[in-house]
Amino acid sequence: MKQAPIHVLVVDDEALARRNLTLLLDGDPDIGTVTECQSGAEAVEAITKSKPDLVFLDVQMPECGGFDVLELVGNKIPAVIFVTAYDEYALRAFEAGALDYLLKPFDDTRFALALGRAKQRLAHTSLSPNQPAERLAIKSRGQVIFLKVTDIDWIEASGDYVSIHVGKKSWLQREAIATVAATRPV
């Protein structure tokens, strides 16, 4: 069964960067429409209205950056690949659920790798939309660890925090319980 065409949104305040991504996407037979936005505010509107499958999102843009976009769209976040010239945001991007992090300037091979990962994730998601997460990403002491969901004994909620318990260990995360419950597979 062939997967439906992937609808992509490219968000960058630099026209040349948007055009480069659009050209790379145009050559892929699995890509349907490609829409461009030049600001974070435009991106929020486009994500809300057109519900793209995949977003290539710049981190730093005037007024409304990539992380602001994710906050503003809330639980309507599609698959995201961050595209930026700044490597210091990589950990934050993955904590926010990004599929990949393309560091400008990137080559065609690196782009193809990121797009391939996105296609795999989208194919998996479209085939089993109600499948629960298999792993949970947890930030602990400056690093990200992955917990198997089946290893978690219980999760305790307290306002905007959750305490995740596995055996005698526990991790405190600044996330609402609803966010943890809706976690996609990583």
Image (tube, rainbow, N blue to C red):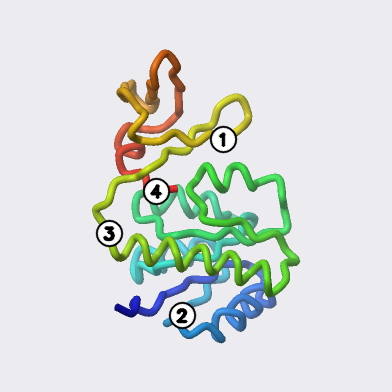
Asked if residue 62 can be seen in this view, the reply is no
Q: Quadrant of the N terminus?
A: bottom left
Instruction: Give the crowd class for mark 2: few <14, some 14-19, many >=20 residues within 10 Å.
Output: some
- Badge number at residue 185: 4
Q: Amino acid at mark 2?
A: Ile
What separation in Å lies between label 1 and label 4 (alpha carbons)?
Answer: 15 Å
- Residue receiving disc 3: 128
Q: Is residue 60 left or right of residue 158?
A: right
Q: Of marks 4 and 3, which one's residue comes earlier in the chain?
A: 3
Kind of residue indicated by mark 4: Pro
Q: Which residue lies at the image location 34% right of the left edge and 76% below the top edge?
A: 3
Along the polypeptide, which appears first: circle 3 or circle 2? Answer: 2
| Residue bearing the label numbered 2 | 31
Of the image marks 2 and 4, the number of the one nearer the N terminus: 2
| Marks 1/3: CA–CA distance | 26 Å
Element type where label 1 sits in the image: strand
Which quadrant holds residue 104? bottom right
Gap between marks 4 and 3 measured at Cα: 11 Å
Q: Residue 23, percent across and down?
A: 61, 83
Q: Earlier in the sequence, mark 1 or mark 4?
A: 1
Whole-percent x, y for residue 80 in the image: 49, 59
User: Which residue is identified by label 1?
Assistant: 144
- Distance from disc 1 to disc 2, alpha carbons, whole Å, reads 31 Å
The answer to whether 86 appears left or right of 27 in the picture is right
Residue at 27% x, 58% y: name it. Answer: 129
Q: Nearer the viewer, residue 159 or 91?
A: 91
Whether residues under marks 4 and 3 lie with C-beta atoms below 8 angstroms apart, the answer is: no
